[in-house]
Image (cartoon, helix red, strand yellow):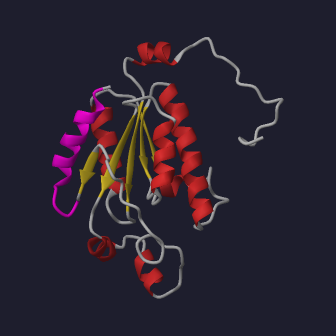
């Protein structure tokens, strides 16, 4: 079958609906997806927004790319197919959490446009907010928090986004944040406006 499912696997309808869960949670679920180069500031922004939403009484969860690779995606490498599967799995988890009524913040490099478009397509209109953290490559390299750019430049690691693997810029994200130009508190105030769920 084209979707890879056996004919014995059927969708089981649930009596508690997404709308019912939203009413109990007193908020609508949403996915806020941070994409950008390594070192751009995705995790920093997602963490700060998570703190601000928590302080405002919102129910949230943060999925961070590195953290997910410690468990759910620990079997995946960095080749293009593995990266696509990493994003697919993270997106499926985010969708379940959104259906449960959470505001899910996702910080993933997610370098390929087609993967992000597939993500968006599985959410209802208004449920998916794409944030392109557009910090320039040279600043990301200066930060190099994990020493990965240096290793990539030395040829010690391959398929590194921005060096020998492409990053495809989102054509129409809901937000663009360049952490080299905008202070964190201002970025968070802007992003909070997208979280009136």
Vertical placement of residue 151 versus 166, above or below: below
Q: Position of residue 57 (x, y in %)?
A: 31, 26
Q: Position of residue 88 (x, y in %)?
A: 57, 48
89 sits to left or right of 139: right
Front position in the image: 33 or 57: 33
Q: Determine if the magenta segment contains residue 192.
A: yes
Q: Position of residue 32 (x, y in %)?
A: 38, 41
Front position in the image: 172 or 29: 172
Residue 114 seen in this snapshot? yes
Magenta stretch secondary structure, dominant: helix
Give the residue at x 47% y 81%.
Answer: 152
**Residues rendered magenta in the picture:** 179-196
Vertical placement of residue 125 versus 20, above or below: below
Q: Determine if the magenta segment contains residue 82.
A: no
Give the residue at x 47% y 77%.
Answer: 164
Give the residue at x 48% y 72%.
Answer: 165
């Amino acid at each position: 079958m084209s979707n890879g499912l056996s004919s014995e696997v059927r969708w089981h309808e649930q009596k508690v609906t997404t709308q019912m869960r939203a009413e109990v949670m007193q908020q609508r679920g949403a996915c806020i997806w941070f994409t950008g180069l390594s070192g751009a500031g995705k995790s920093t922004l997602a963490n700060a927004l998570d703190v601000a939403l928590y302080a405002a009484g919102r129910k949230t969860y943060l999925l961070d790319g590195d953290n997910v690779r410690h468990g759910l995606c620990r079997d995946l490498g960095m080749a293009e197919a593995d990266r696509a599967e990493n994003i697919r799995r993270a997106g499926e988890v985010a969708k379940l959490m959104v259906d449960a009524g959470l505001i899910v913040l996702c910080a993933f490099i997610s370098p390929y446009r087609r993967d992000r478009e597939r993500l968006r397509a599985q959410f209802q209109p208004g449920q998916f907010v794409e944030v392109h953290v557009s910090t320039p490559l040279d600043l990301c390299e200066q930060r190099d928090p994990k020493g990965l750019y240096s290793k990539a430049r030395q040829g010690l690691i391959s398929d590194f986004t921005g060096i020998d693997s492409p990053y495809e810029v989102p054509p129409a994200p809901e937000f663009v944040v360049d952490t080299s130009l905008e202070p964190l508190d201002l970025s968070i105030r802007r992003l909070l406006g997208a979280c009136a769920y």
